[in-house]
Image (tube, rainbow, N blue to C red):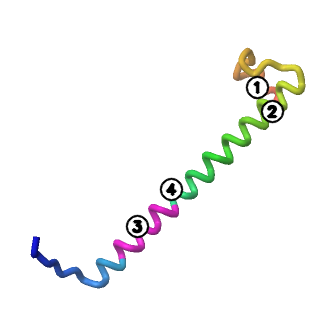
Amino acid sequence: MGKSYRVESADLDRFIREQKAVRRSLLWQHRFDRAMEVSQRAFRDYLVAQGYNPETLSDEEVERLLR
């Protein structure tokens, strides 16, 4: 308590930019994760509508269906 610190303005500016970049990166990661969830759910719904059981399909069968 009672201590003060001196920080160069360039260092402070860099720190603030880096923090904004981290927040922006996390926001984009969240958006990407959400888009993947929506896409996976849509593909699962498509498989069910086509009469497939997504739980029993092998990776090879899914790859074939995606082509």
Residue range highlighted in magenta: 14-24
Residue at image point 36% right, 75% down:
14
Give the CA distance from mark 2 to mark 4.
30 Å
Secondary structure category for the residue under label 1 = helix
- Answer whether residue 10 is magenta in the image: no
Mark 1: few, some, or many residues within 10 Å (few <14, many ≥20)? few
Q: Where does the image place residue 7, in percent across and percent down from the top left?
A: 22, 80
- Answer whether residue 18 is magenta in the image: yes
Which residue, given by chain and number where applicable, does mark 1 sit on? 62
Give the number of the mark in front: 3 or 1.
3
Mark 3: few, some, or many residues within 10 Å (few <14, many ≥20)? few
Q: Where does the image place residue 40, in percent across and percent down from the top left?
A: 71, 36
Compared across the picture, whether 5 is left or right of 42 comes to left
Mark 2: few, some, or many residues within 10 Å (few <14, many ≥20)? few
Which residue, given by chain and number where applicable, does mark 4 sit on? 26
Q: Where does the image place residue 20, in percent across and percent down from the top left?
A: 45, 68
Is 65 placed above or below 24 here? above
Check whether the beta carbons of the residues at disc 3 and disc 1 lie within 8 A of each other.
no
Residue 4, picture quadrant: bottom left
Give the CA distance from mark 1 to mark 2.
6 Å
Return the mark for residue 66. 2
Check whether the beta carbons of the residues at disc 1 and disc 2 lie within 8 A of each other.
yes
Among numbered discs 2 and 4, the one appearing first in the sequence: 4
Residue at image point 76% right, 26% down:
62
Q: Quadrant of the N terminus?
A: bottom left
At label 2, the amino acid type is Leu
Mark 4: few, some, or many residues within 10 Å (few <14, many ≥20)? few
Residue at image point 52% right, 63% down:
24
Among numbered discs 2 and 3, the one appearing first in the sequence: 3
Return the mark for residue 19. 3
At label 1, the amino acid type is Val
Check whether the beta carbons of the residues at disc 1 and disc 4 lie within 8 A of each other.
no
